[in-house]
Image (cartoon, rainbow, N blue to C red):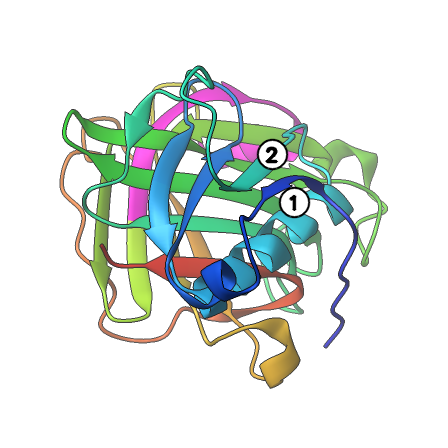
Amino acid sequence: MRRLALPIALVLALGSSSAALADSPVAVDCGNGSGFTAAVDSLTLTSLQASLDGVAANPTGVTCSLAVGTLDPTIGLSTTSSGGFVVGGGRFDRGPGPGPMQGCGLNFSISAHASPNGFNGTQNYTINNADGCGDLSLHGHVKANVTCLAIVGNRAQIKGVITEISGGFTTLASAGDTLETDVEDNGNPSGGIPDLIDVFPGTAGTNLVCAAPTTSPFFEVENGNITVHDR
């Protein structure tokens, strides 16, 4: 298992060291109108920082920012999280087995949250030439929005509609189909227990109802972190 912690764009405006011990207001923005604000404890804040480090270290074309402390009211984020959120970035290896993408490493970045206006965010996956995926025909990218999110404990399910797709991903799905991401948050990377992730394409029109997985997703996050936060 490999873990990295690289610097990300942080805007720190904590009033005092004691303020960091209480819930801190944060703003997460990964573009595409998916920004949100929330109040989180110190452990969740550390996990969020690790998640966005994972986004930066494993590119999918997404750039995220994290602001902490006294937030500028003109920041213009689209929504406030009222029903939980999932933020993650990193890489996982599909491992040996049948199928053209087995053995490929997938970079991922996900940002999903529930708001008073519904669900917002994006799912992004990219295949490049790392980790056993030298076949150029498999390289590509898939992007989907977020249309539902369900969280139970440390597990969550995200669904959305595919809006961009290229390369090897086109053998599995098409624009307009559903993309489902299941995740399990097993703590910060320093804890030594990897987070888990699965991604599934589905037929169009199956993106409206989410149910958090009752069993653990299959693939270990080798480089990065996933933060699941329920309310």
The alpha-carbon separation of the residues under discs 2 and 1 comes to 7 Å
The residue indicated by pointer 1 is 55
Q: Secondary structure at mark 2?
A: loop
Say whether residue 26 is left or right of residue 12.
left
> Residue 94 location in percent, x, y?
62, 62
Viewer-closest of 71 and 146: 71
Amino acid type at image mark 2: Cys
The residue indicated by pointer 2 is 64
Residue 170's place in the image compared with 196, above or below, is above
Whether residue 202 is visible: no
> Residue 221 location in percent, x, y?
60, 66
| Number of other residues with Cα within 10 Å of mark 1, as a class: few under 14, some 14 to 19, many 20 or more | many
| Number of other residues with Cα within 10 Å of mark 2, as a class: few under 14, some 14 to 19, many 20 or more | some
> Residue 132 location in percent, x, y?
81, 57
Amino acid type at image mark 1: Val
**Going 22% across and 54% down the picture, which residue do you hit?**
231
Residue 81's place in the image compared with 175, above or below, is below
Count of marks placed on residues: 2
Viewer-closest of 128 and 52: 52
Magenta highlight range: 158-173
Whether residue 176 is visible: yes
Q: Secondary structure at mark 1?
A: helix
> Residue 160 location in percent, x, y?
32, 32
**Going 36% across and 75% down the picture, which residue do you hit?**
216
Viewer-closest of 33 and 70: 70
**Going 75% across and 33% down the picture, which residue do you hit?**
137
Name which quarter of the figure residue 115 lies in. top left
Task: Identify the image quadrant of the N terminus.
Answer: bottom right
